[in-house]
Amino acid sequence: MVTTTPAWNTADLKQKGKDHLLNSVSNLKLVREFGPLVISHGEGVYLWDTDGKRYIDGFAGLWNVNIGHGRSELGQAMAQQVDEVAFVPTFFGLAAPRTIELAARLGDMFPGSINHFNFTSGGSESIETALKIARYYWYLQGKGDKIKILSRHMAYHGIAMGALAATGIPAYHTGFGPGMPGFIHLTAPYAYRNAEGMSETEFVDKLIEELEETIAREGADTIAAMIGEPVQGAGGVVPPPASYWHRVQETLRKHDILLIADEVICGFGRTGTMFGHVTYDYAPDIAAFAKGITSGYVPLGGVGVSDAIWDVLSEPDRVFMHGFTYSGHPVACAAALANLDIIENEQLPENAGVQGERLLTGLQAALGDHKNVGDIRGKGLMVIIELVDDVHSKAKLDAALNVGGKLQAATRSRGLIARANNDGIAFAPPLIISADEVDAMIDAASGAISEVLG
Ligand SMILES: Cc1ncc(COP(=O)(O)O)c(C=O)c1O
């Protein structure tokens, strides 16, 4: 934790931000006019701006600061690593001790046969790696035509070109030219709009029927893998029906198609167990992760593959031509080891389950009857309030009303940073959050919705 805060000049920083910073996933016209909200320090679930205003970090940065802010253990681990050796690549058969220790520790943490790890600098690179390994696995077995990737609408897998091709949210594609061919998007397991009039079993049957039809149409001998987030995140927080992943896995295995779990958000505790595929009780062939592996203190991601895939990859006497300069960066791996100590010792997955339930039921009690609240759903500490114009027709709110912008301002004025847009407010606080802090988030969100929508 920072005990003395530099006296930042907010006006000066805002001006420099306006003049020089090109923000990501932000309305650049607004940033250019008003400048960014400048956050100077954090502790626990709280952040402070340069004017000293305190906020609950209700989105844990970007669903990633699982251990909360200001944990000096990570800084110490990184400083020690810099003193020992700051950089060793994993190219050319090299590796630093903590890179190897992290791979071995992940081998113990992942259930099933996911035992072999390639590291990256973040989620998109992890998805690129997972997709390429899936294709390469088939190529090495003489099945070089198995290249297509099945994904879902509403999926978010990142913004690098391969990850973007798997992403099923139209707004991320607009204006960026043609995407990669060979990606096929299936219906999301989003019961609120896709399961009208169906029981849960009928809904899952319908999704599996679509999967079977797609495989029959495209040909299993052209499909490398299906990728999915255990709980879809950025597309709208979609916890699937309980039997969904098991049924998907059964179908894919029957057709010799690999299953990739995108654990970038769900991994390391967010859904109430260590991994999303543990929460939903299935066993992917490949798992991609990032975010929570270091709680965002320093960039790191990675991909774990099963023993079966490792056996194929490591069989030929040839070079695996994939990797990034920072794959297995020792400083990031040192931070990850200290972070995993905290996640395990403080039982953060369990807390995510308990506090996630409190957040979900608290929001449902406070807002369930509101005229614009269509659905409140979540799993662990991933929760969303979906807003609509009319709860009966489920018509979306008119974008011209700018409800998202107004909710962003109304939540921030109440000391809450969450992800607000015209479709609702999503929450993903640090996994260390307490019951009182959850209640404060519920109060702030309810107050903001009343202010903006009555
Ligand atoms: C499920 C999922 N996969 C992949 C990514 C991409 O990660 P990054 O932004 O680190 O590239 C994200 C980012 O939010 C994500 O939520």
Image: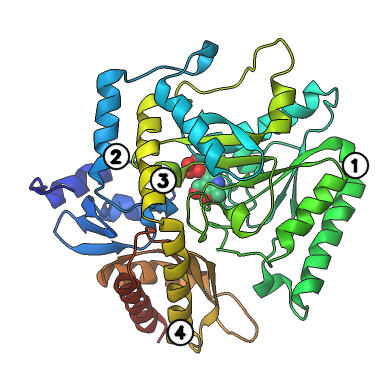
Disc 4: CA contacts within 10 A as few (<14), some (14-19) or many (>=20): many
Cα gap from disc 2 to disc 3, whole angstroms: 26 Å
- Mark found first going from the N terminus, 1 or 2: 2
Check disc 1 and give the amino acid type.
Gly
- Mark found first going from the N terminus, 3 or 1: 3
1 or 2: mark nearer the eye: 2
Residue 295 position, x and y percent, is: 38, 46
The image quarter containing residue 241 is: bottom right
Residue 301 left/right relative to 242 = left
Check disc 2 and give the amino acid type.
Leu
Residue at x-position 65% and y-position 12% = 319
- Mark found first going from the N terminus, 4 or 2: 2
Check disc 4 and give the amino acid type.
Leu
Residue 236 position, x and y percent, is: 56, 63
Cα gap from disc 1 to disc 2, whole angstroms: 48 Å
- Mark found first going from the N terminus, 4 or 1: 1
Residue linked to disc 3 = 24
Residue closer to the observer: 381 or 8: 381
Cα gap from disc 4 to disc 2, whole angstroms: 38 Å
Residue 346 position, x and y percent, is: 36, 55
3 or 4: mark nearer the eye: 4
Q: Look at the image and tell me whether residue 137 can be seen.
A: yes
Secondary element under disc 3, as helix, strand or loop, is: loop
Q: Is residue 57 above or below residue 120?
A: below
Residue linked to disc 1 = 219
Cα gap from disc 3 to disc 4, whole angstroms: 31 Å
The tag on residue 74 is 2
- Mark found first going from the N terminus, 2 or 3: 3
Q: Check whether the beta carbons of the residues at disc 4 and disc 1 lie within 8 A of each other.
A: no
The tag on residue 367 is 4
